[in-house]
Image (tube, rainbow, N blue to C red):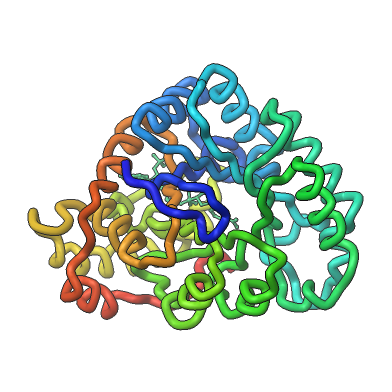
Amino acid sequence: MHYRALGKTGLKVSEIGYGAWGLGRREWIGADDKESLRSLNRAIDLGVNFLDTALAYGEGHSEGLIGRVLKERREEVYVATKVPPKNRRWPAPDDVPVSQTYPGDYIVECCEKSLKNLGRDHVDVLQLHTWQDRFLDEDGWRDALLSLKKSGKARLLGVSVNDHDPASALRAVRSGVFDTFQIIYNIFDQSPDDEFLPACLEHGRGVIARVPFDEGALTGTITPETEFPDGDFRNHYFGGDRKRQVWDRVLRLRKLLGEGEAATLPELALRFCLAHDAVSTVIPGMRKVPNVEANTSVSDGRRLTASLKTALRAHAWPRDFYS
Ligand SMILES: NC(=O)c1ccc[n+]([C@@H]2O[C@H](COP(=O)([O-])OP(=O)(O)OC[C@H]3O[C@@H](n4cnc5c(N)ncnc54)[C@H](OP(=O)(O)O)[C@@H]3O)[C@@H](O)[C@H]2O)c1
């Protein structure tokens, strides 16, 4: 495992981090807690030292599993969690004031709940789970976050940027309030390349690249025939003829695979994220040990060639399957 600076925070994080949404068993159906615990342990064995979770992931279930694992481990492992919007609306709507989304006392209450679930006296990164640019001009949330930082309960502060909307966080990147930014960055959504990632580099912000596989599309395992369990959010995400659209794209992308640079689609997808100097860590969602082993093996110090990076630009596919 190779490690990178988390911006100018002083932390060194594993290039492959751990996305723990699926462990919550609420939006993603089908995780088995015993396998989740094995996966988390295997990831730490293999050098992963950055885990991303959220209070909302199974209302603390994902945090609770992480807490159980970390209690037994002696390695230094950093945990990033998130404060859910009080109105439970993702993405943050345009017309709702921050006083209804992130009131100060609510932020503190959520942080305390996360600490309890995690069994820790601090979180390494406390992120707001949604963001709107105008929050910067409104009061309440900032004092609460800064007081949590001052008390040491939140070592660093972050934002999880709204889906496919890097421009909405540019002012926040420059503001100096936040240390890290979590952003959708993958072969299909390359929009952070334009302004967002250069701004993070310029200002020394840590970048957590999320959804590297476009919720599984970029693993090549989703075919027009794939079925998801009842209640799983992917029934919406890949609804209608989207599985067919994804499959057509994936077939074209596969032509870029080869033994030299990336032998599999998951490998190519992760190498794409790690090819940008601004990215501190990429956090694939992992619920099974074989996926942990395959994904961690990608951090071997090799970088994509300029020609493959250029070829991947043609595979950008702007759209929003979340809405
Ligand atoms: N708003 C936010 O803040 C927000 C939103 C979304 C995600 N996130 C964070 O980002 C993380 C990553 O995103 P995600 O989990 O939604 O999606 P993702 O990482 O793009 O994709 C996860 C999917 O990829 C599969 N997978 C992982 N490794 C694989 C491999 N080597 N080969 C084949 N399949 C593989 C997983 O398999 P299984 O189904 O077998 O597990 C799962 O179905 C989340 O876990 C969460 O921590 C944050």
Specify the quadrant of the image occupied by residue 228: top left
Residue under the point 82% across and 58% down: 87
Extreme residue in the left direction: 259
Residue 250 coordinates in the image, percent (x, y): 25, 64
Q: Residue at x 84, y 51 (%)?
A: 147
Query: As drawn, is 76 to the left or to the right of 4?
Result: right
Q: Position of residue 45 (x, y in %)?
A: 37, 27
Is residue 224 visible in the rendered image? The answer is no
Position of 200 with respect to 119 (left or right) is left
Q: Which quadrant would the C terminus be assigned to in this image? A: bottom right
Q: Quadrant of the rendered structure where residue 142 is? A: bottom right
Is there any visible trace of residue 137 in the rendered image? yes
Q: Is residue 216 above or below residue 43?
A: below
Q: Nearer the viewer, residue 300 or 151?
A: 151
Residue 188 placement (x, y as % from top left): 37, 70
Question: At x 64% / y 76%, what residue is drawn?
Answer: 174
Where the N terminus falls, by quadrant? top left
Side (left or right) of 185 relative to 53 = left
Residue at 71 percent of width and 37 percent of height: 122
Q: Depth check: give the residue in front, 64 or 194.
A: 194
Q: Name above or below for residue 293 compared with residue 11.
A: above
The quarter of the picture where residue 308 lies is bottom left
